[in-house]
Each structure stands twice: as C-alpha cells, then as structure tokens.
Image (cartoon, rainbow, N blue to C red):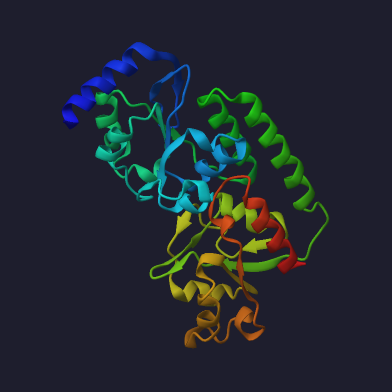
Amino acid sequence: MLKKIMILNAFIFTICFSKILVDSTGRKIQTPEHIKRVVSTVPSNTEIIVDMGFIDLLVGVDNYSEKVDERLNGKGFFRSDDLNEEKIVELMPDLVITSYHNIKKGKESLKFFDEVGIPVYVIKSPRNLYEIADSVDEIGEILNKKNEAEDLKNRFLKELKEVASSKELKKRKIYFEISDKPIYTTGSETFLNDVLESVGGENIFRDNKGWISPALESILERNPEVILVSEDRKETVEKILKRDEWQDISAIKNRKVYYIDESINRPSPRILKALKELKEVLE
C-alpha cells in the first residue's frame, strides 16, 4: 500500500511542479504553484506560518508545535529530532518545511523524500534576531505568500527596534541554562545569544561559538550575575538556587535566578515576548 501511495505521490508532484527554490542545504527544491497541504516539523516555522494567517495549510506538525495554537491539537505527529517518513507519505503534503535540527544525517536524511517526490525545504537557522525576519521572508517565498510575510516581518522589526533599547545599559553577566544533564547553553553567533545581549546582557560564554556543553568549573569561574532558564523549566529555579557547588556564584548569593517566557527557545517573531520579559529583569 505504501509503495502505491509513493508512486502516486511522485506522479502527482511531477506534473504539478511550477517553481524551483534553493534551500539552506544548497538543494534545488521543486514546489507546486498552489500549496494547500504543509507539514512543519519545527515550532518556530509553525509559529511563522500561523502568525502569517495560514494555519489551515498545516496538515501535520511536530509535537512541540501543538502548543503554538489550540487548533493544531491532534496534528502533532513528529518528534522534533526526526522525520517520520511513513507518516509524511500518509499525509501527502505539497511541501514539508523543516530545519537542520530534523536531519540527523544531513542531505542523506532527505533522499527518501526526493525519491517519492515530496518537496522538503530546509530553512536556514537564524543566528541573530534580525535573521528571524529573513526566515519570515523565506517562508513567504516558499508558500507564495509574500505580502503576508512582508506584513509580519515589518511588524516584528518595528517592535524589535522599540524593545531592543539603544541607550547604554549596565552590562549584566548572564548564564542561560538550556539543560543541566548534560550542561548545555549558548555561545556567540546564535539567536539566543543575540536575545541576551540586545537588552543589556553579556553572555558569559560569548567567547565560544554556537551551542555548547561547558564544564561546571567554567560556569563557576565566570561567576554570572544573572542565571536564566526558559519557562518550561521554571521548576528548576529553586533547584539551581540550592545547588551546593554554586553557592559562591553572584547570581545565587543575590537570588538573581529567573525563568523567561518559553518563546525564548524559538527563533520566530513571538520571541519578542521573551525579549520584553528579559529587559524587565535586567533594568
């Protein structure tokens, strides 16, 4: 049965392709002129599609994306770290929008979809707040919804300019804990680092690049003044304050450990909510 669906799907896509795009992996992607069925496997991309006004296009999303909008309840078919080939074929989407996070084996992970004729577009991962605007443009181009993308992008950039204060702020040394087992945080050249530094923070690991797993000793040595986690880990705030090895850290002594809205985890325009909360914490 699956083989028949694959053959039919390949035939349908072959006769309907009208546009060729190049994604962030350098692959040429052929997409239909009229896209009516979309699978999104990353919450940030899902948020952009929803906030552009096209939730009805989404026939399947990852598990985390179900929280983006209650209308997506029951459509969370995918883990955020994997592409479910059989389920995607079953859904017969016109397009799958994903990111590097989903393709463990790089381009090798996408060969199956190339063979069955399902276009999979890999979005570039934003490395700063302004590249989120580029993601909005990119998704608008993919979906042939440029006007709606332009509107969302302009609203985001306008509010970003207002929130990211231009005045000189006292720099606070920040440690943002993504997880503790293993210890995982951000260095420079990530959207999260840009969030921390746009409103007066100084990431204690800004001399490292990308997403990192530092040694506990390096956190103690760098002595952060503020420690942050996202709201989905808010129960860890009290645990962090009680960690034996951390009692000499400035943030622990002064009880400057906070949780920030979980939109801080995702590079979409909704991250502005987290940015505003962070600004209040640091001012």
Q: Quadrant of residue 108?
A: top left
| Rendered residue at 72%/35% (across/down) | 154
Residue 263: give x, y in percent of width and height.
Answer: 58, 55
| Rendered residue at 48%/19% (across/down) | 34
Q: Quadrant of residue 114?
A: top left
Residue 208: give x, y in percent of width and height.
Answer: 51, 57
Q: In this picture, is 33 found above or below 248?
A: above
Q: Nearer the viewer, residue 127 or 102?
A: 102
Q: In this picture, is 183 found above or below 245?
A: above
- Quadrant, the N terminus: top left
Q: Quadrant of residue 199?
A: bottom right
Q: In this picture, is 116 found above or below 240?
A: above
- Residue sitting at the far right: 167
Q: Nearer the viewer, residue 230 or 64?
A: 64
Q: Nearer the viewer, residue 177 or 118?
A: 118
Q: In this picture, is 245 found above or below 22?
A: below
So how many labels did they put on this image? 0
Residue 175: give x, y in percent of width and height.
Answer: 57, 68
- Horizontal relation, residue 221 to residue 95: left or right: right
Residue 157: give x, y in percent of width and height.
Answer: 72, 40
- Quadrant, the C terminus: bottom right
| Rendered residue at 22%/27% (across/down) | 5
| Rendered residue at 56%/53% (across/down) | 188
